[in-house]
Image (cartoon, rainbow, N blue to C red):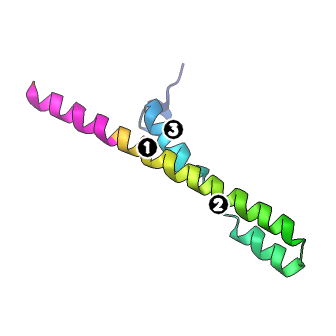
Amino acid sequence: FVDAETIFGFDPSLLELVTFGSLIAATDTVSVLGIFQQKHVDPHLFNLVFGESALNDAVAIVLFKTFSTTLERNTIHDRESLIDV
């Protein structure tokens, strides 16, 4: 059995992994919207893609903020417990 630390040099926790996942979850649809404008697609489709993109970005921001704050608090707590020992 080979673990992540052996392969990558670090062993991320589940919280670190979901924090990173939420960071990269936001997708950039600016290029798609630009192509839609050039091709003069149906405005309804443009608005649907734009709205879906805005919602995805908002959810990704909330998730990242929540996970990163939790990760930061856990890290600070762990450091304080190490100092107290």
Give the residue pinned by disc 1: 66
Q: Position of residue 50 (x, y in %)?
A: 72, 65
Q: Is residue 85 magenta?
A: no
The answer to whether the residues at label 3 and label 2 have Cβ atoms under 8 Å apart is: no
Q: Dot 3: what SS?
A: helix
Relative to 35, is 16 above or below? above
Q: Position of residue 8 (x, y in %)?
A: 48, 39
The answer to whether the residues at label 2 and label 1 have Cβ atoms under 8 Å apart is: no
Q: Main secondary structure of the magenta part?
A: helix
Give the residue pinned by disc 2: 54
Q: Toward the viewer: 66 or 18?
A: 66
Disc 3 from disc 2: Cα separation: 21 Å
The residue located at (23%, 33%) in the rendering is: 77
* Mark toward the viewer: 3 or 2: 2
Amino acid at pointer 2 = Ala
Closer to the N terminus: mark 3 or mark 2? 3
The residue located at (32%, 42%) in the rendering is: 72
Give the residue pinned by disc 3: 18
Q: Position of residue 12 (x, y in %)?
A: 43, 34
Disc 2 from disc 1: Cα separation: 18 Å
Q: Dot 2: what SS?
A: helix
Disc 1 from disc 3: Cα separation: 10 Å
| Number of other residues with Cα within 10 Å of mark 2, as a class: few under 14, some 14 to 19, many 20 or more | some
Q: Is residue 33 left or right of residue 66?
A: right
The residue located at (51%, 45%) in the rendering is: 63
Residue numbers of the magenta segment = 72-84
Please state, as top left, top right, bottom left or bottom right, where the N terminus lies in the image.
top right
Relative to 21, is 35 above or below? below
The residue located at (16%, 29%) in the rendering is: 82
